[in-house]
């Protein structure tokens, strides 16, 4: 039987043509071009299988709930300007504690107070640029048993206690910053008068420290090891009778046991300037056909196929053999300083853009993920970054009306890191996404 005759038979099934024209868009065959009849209808091959690759796919950028950072083992500090997301700023807040009894003699003489901040190997941004780290005294203590988030902050004095210029090179294992002598003398005198015997007494004099980047910095975000025993404020002093025998006492972050970091974006000059409310979505049509993912800022990409259920107008019983969604990264938006997330996850959402259950693999043994890969693009013949999701179980459940057709949220697996990616939407000129679905007619 010819392909044309088979298509005419389909047209006799109620609602097919209407369904196709209303929303499915162009459905194309996986066969050769001469097997295609028109541009709006699928072609059924002798195997009874069709390939649909031009369904309408809508993408948008959603601002989700902020991630908790007071439960993290890290702090983050730094600032850089992102051409898409605006100026990204990270600040950290920590409480120091007593490492043990601090009972210097009354005649102890102050020498210096130095804050030591150990780093790990993680950086995000341009590590070749000079940047600054300023230390400020908190005006209010970090509350116990309180969860702090990436949007949280605490007030601190405008004048810094100390500052340091540096480059966030990979070989940098720690930063040492000399703090204001007046603070050191105050702490030493209080200890000598036995007024620094508990952490509460320390809080009364030093509620904590804020680590802040320099206002004009455009460099990198640097991650610090908050739970390291090496994160200390070292107070050096001596006694007049033994001036050549220096003494040292450590106020430690581990003893303080409270910390968090803040990550925020100034989006006023970006395409996302209108994104101000939690669970708000900005369509890709308003952001140059791009959508964005950034964990620490709470930016996720929503993917919707609004007319997917129109496939049910084909009539009969159809099975989804495979469904593959490939999203390309926009050319020129990633480099060695701004790498994309290594893996993205997919989770259900609703019309209010709330986060639902994570999708699982076909055998339901693990969370469904898509790894970042670089392959040769069939469009440009150049190497291109992309993520590919195998969504057959999800779309089959939607077609069977077992799952609402409210879309998916794509996010990095680690929400407390600032890796971001720019994904092309369906209407993007050079990096459009692609959704391909194979269906087989069972009867």
Image (cartoon, rainbow, N blue to C red):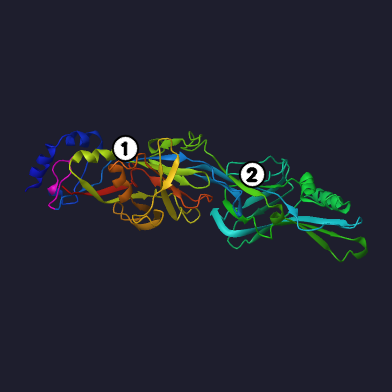
Q: Is residue 163 above or below residue 309?
A: below
Please determine whether, in this image, residue 184 is positioned above or below residue 65. below
Front residue of this view, candidates 154 and 399: 399
SS for callout 1: loop
Q: Which residue is mark 2?
A: 146
State the mark number for residue 306. Answer: 1
Say if the magenta span includes residue 69: no
Q: Which element type, helix, strand or loop, lies under badge 2?
A: loop
The percent coordinates of residue 326 (x first, y second) are 34, 50
Picture quadrant of residue 311: top left
Nearer to the camera, 265 or 320: 320
Task: Tell me, yes or no, if residue 281 can be seen here.
Answer: yes
For the residues bearing labels 2 and 1, Cβ distance under 8 angstroms: no
State whether residue 25 appears in this view: no
Q: Residue at x 10, y 44 (%)?
A: 6
Where on the picture, by quarter, is residue 306?
A: top left
- The secondary structure that dominates the magenta segment is loop
């Amino acid at each position: 039987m010819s392909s044309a005759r088979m298509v005419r038979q389909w047209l006799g099934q109620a609602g097919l043509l209407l369904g196709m024209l209303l929303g499915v868009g162009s459905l194309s065959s996986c066969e050769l071009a001469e097997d295609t009849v028109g541009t709006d209808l699928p072609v059924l091959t002798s195997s009874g299988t069709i390939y649909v690759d031009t369904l309408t796919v809508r993408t948008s950028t959603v601002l989700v709930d902020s991630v908790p950072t007071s439960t993290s083992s890290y702090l983050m500090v730094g600032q850089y300007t992102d051409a898409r997301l605006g100026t990204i700023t990270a600040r950290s807040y920590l409480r120091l504690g007593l490492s043990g009894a601090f009972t210097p003699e009354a005649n102890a003489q102050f020498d210096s107070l130095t804050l030591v901040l150990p780093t790990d190997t993680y950086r995000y941004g341009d590590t070749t640029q000079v940047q600054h780290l300023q230390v400020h005294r908190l005006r209010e203590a970090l509350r116990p048993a309180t969860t702090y988030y990436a949007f949280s902050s605490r007030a601190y004095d405008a004048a810094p206690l100390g500052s340091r210029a540096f480059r966030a090179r990979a070989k940098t294992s720690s930063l040492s910053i000399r703090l204001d002598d007046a603070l050191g003398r105050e702490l030493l005198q209080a200890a000598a008068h036995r007024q620094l015997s508990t952490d509460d007494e320390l809080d009364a004099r030093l509620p904590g420290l804020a680590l802040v980047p320099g206002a004009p910095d455009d460099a990198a975000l640097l991650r610090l090891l908050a739970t390291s025993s090496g994160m200390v404020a070292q107070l050096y002093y001596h006694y007049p009778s033994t001036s050549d025998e220096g003494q040292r006492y450590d106020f430690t972050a581990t003893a303080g046991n409270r910390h968090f970091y803040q990550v925020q974006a100034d989006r006023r000059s970006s395409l996302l300037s209108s994104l101000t409310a939690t669970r708000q979505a900005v369509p890709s049509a308003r952001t140059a056909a791009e959508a964005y993912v950034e964990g620490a800022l709470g930016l996720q990409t929503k993917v919707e196929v609004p007319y997917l259920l129109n496939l049910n107008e084909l009539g009969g019983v159809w099975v989804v053999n495979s469904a593959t969604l490939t999203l390309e990264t926009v050319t020129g938006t990633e480099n060695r300083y701004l790498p994309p997330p290594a893996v993205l996850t997919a989770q259900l959402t609703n019309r209010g853009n709330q986060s639902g259950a994570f999708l699982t693999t076909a055998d339901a043994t693990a969370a469904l993920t898509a790894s970042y890969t670089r392959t040769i693009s069939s469009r440009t013949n150049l190497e291109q970054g992309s993520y590919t999701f195998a969504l057959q179980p999800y779309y089959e459940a939607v077609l069977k009306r077992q799952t609402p057709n409210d879309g998916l949220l794509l996010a990095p697996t680690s929400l407390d890191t600032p890796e971001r990616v720019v994904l092309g939407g369906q209407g993007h000129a050079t990096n459009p996404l692609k959704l391909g679905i194979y269906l087989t007619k069972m009867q």
